[in-house]
Amino acid sequence: MTQTKIALACSVCGARNYQVAGGKLSHRLTLKKYCRHCGKQTLHQVTR
């Protein structure tokens, strides 16, 4: 099974800050990460 790169975007400003490796089940992934554009920790969700 191959893993694909998934981009995570900030839910506040929409900036794509992070990329994680994931498979088929990571389409609902939501993580709390630091956004350098907002200057605080926000929820980051999977983008297409």
Image (tube, rainbow, N blue to C red):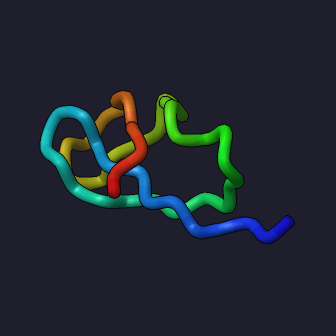
Which residue is pictured at 64% across the width and 68% down the height? 4
The foreground one among 5 and 44 is 5
**Quadrant of res 41:** top left
The foreground one among 42 and 29 is 29
Count the labels in the image. 0
Looking at the image, the residue that sits furthest to the left is 13
Image check: 30 left or right of 43? right
Q: Position of residue 36 (x, y in %)?
A: 30, 53
Which residue is pictured at 79% across the width and 70% down the height? 2
Q: Position of residue 26 (x, y in %)?
A: 61, 41
Image quarter (top left, top right, bottom left or bottom right) of the N terminus: bottom right
Which residue is pictured at 42% across the width and 45% down the height? 46
Q: Position of residue 48 (x, y in %)?
A: 33, 57
Q: Is residue 6 above or below residue 43?
A: below
Image check: 3 left or right of 30? right
Q: Is residue 48 above or below residue 28?
A: below
The foreground one among 26 and 31 is 26
Q: Is residue 3 above or below residue 28?
A: below
Q: Position of residue 37 (x, y in %)?
A: 20, 53
Image check: 17 left or right of 32? left
Which residue is pictured at 43% across the width and 60% down the height? 7
Looking at the image, the residue that sits furthest to the right is 1
